[in-house]
Amino acid sequence: MATLPVYMQRQEFDPIPELAVLREEEGIRRVTTPLGIDAWVVARHSDVRAMLSDTERFSNARSFPLREAGMPAFSEEETAAMRAGNLLAADPPDHTRLRRLLTPEFTVRRMRRLEPRIHEIVEQHLDVMERAGSPADLVSAFALPIPSLVICELLGVPYEDRADFQERTGRILDVSLPMRERLEMQRKSREYMAGLVARTKADPGEELLGMLVREHGDDLTDAELVGIGNLLLVAGHETTSNMLSLGTLALLRHPDQLELLRQEPDRITSAVEELLRWLSIVHSGLARTTKTEVEIAGQIVGPGEMVVAGLAVANRDPKSFPDPDVLDIARDAAGHVAFGHGLHHCLGAPLARMEMRIAFPALLRRFPGLRPVEQEFRAFHFVYGLSSFQVEW
């Protein structure tokens, strides 16, 4: 079994106490990542934001090997195929070019066009839950299918393929599995998306992939279209799904906050931001590589070294958020780094926020007596959350 690096370790909702000590005393520490590579983990909120916004000294286009000892090195063609279209692994100007093509589709105004359909999807799944009766697994009945269906419709991915891509995604992001197996799942994901891109190019529809083919087909290679599709499919369901299940448990475990939200439903926007900050389900985002010598928290880090942002511990920094370990949906959580920061700030943040603003209140309205029975936290995963969550009402 793989050993979790300190920045991925939790005690249910909270980063382990050692991380708070790291943040307050050192600010940065050398650790071993799940890839077996040494890296510096940055713990303070101000340092994390500074690092994530600095593309002059920190690179996302990393060159560290994604393979285990004994595995053959990737060819240049294989490496290029794995990186093509992946905004998270690109620096300007490549990142700027790709993001410019996608940003118009993820503006708040564009997302609002999806709002009626998201309401329908949420209510349909609540209807199914209600008909099936109590108890239910909130992950499989509600939290996972809703964002999966939304991203499928947005991208143009057949919803009947969801079981396969959800399984592949889960295995790719599971750090307890051998890298060889995870890379094989990545290969299968690219093969799947390559087939979808080919069908879309033959008959582009109104979905996002069809729009990219019609409007930017001359600007994007097939490999880039595959990479963009894969990134959006994975990020579009995995993160929001875990926020919905873990966020519901957090509210049920904090009845004062749940009651405040019931009494003042207009607080849902601030509640979502506070849940994002407090839960920080993405442990670190993608690691950066230093382009030059840098100083972080008084520590000199040489060029060519890996640096990881400890997002969960940074979002609990008392210098930025008073009483940070307290879940307080009335607080102003602006400035949190749950979606990252800077050029690589999550492209789909407006969609994720909309889904949560719709789904949480709808669930709580439909089942006012909702209560947790048992849950299983999912530790060995790049996205923290629950693998199952039994509820009754």
Image (spheres, rainbow, N blue to C red):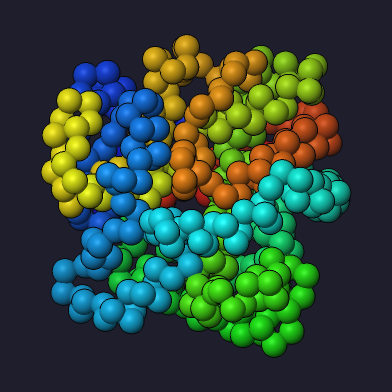
| Marker count (numbered) | 0
Residue that appears at 16% across and 74% down:
70
Q: Quarter of the image holding residue 273?
A: top right
Residue that appears at 23% across and 47% down:
290
Q: Is residue 195 above or below residue 172?
A: below
Q: Observer-nearest residue: 15 or 217? A: 217
Q: Observer-nearest residue: 58 or 138? A: 58
Quarter holding the C terminus is top right
Residue that appears at 74% across and 84% down:
203
**Quick check: can you spot residue 102?**
yes
Q: Position of residue 312 (x, y in %)?
A: 41, 33
Quarter holding the N terminus is bottom left
**Quick check: can you spot residue 137?**
no
Residue that appears at 69% across and 66% down:
208
For residue 85, side relative to residue 78 (left or right): right
Q: Position of residue 387 (x, y in %)?
A: 53, 49
Q: Position of residue 62 (x, y in %)?
A: 29, 58
Q: Observer-nearest residue: 228 or 129? A: 228
Residue that lies at the very extreme toward the top in this rendered image: 322
Q: Observer-nearest residue: 37 or 176? A: 37
Q: Is residue 220 above or below residue 371?
A: below
Q: Is residue 388 above or below residue 68?
A: above
Q: Position of residue 59 (x, y in %)?
A: 31, 51
For residue 6, side relative to residue 304 (left or right): right
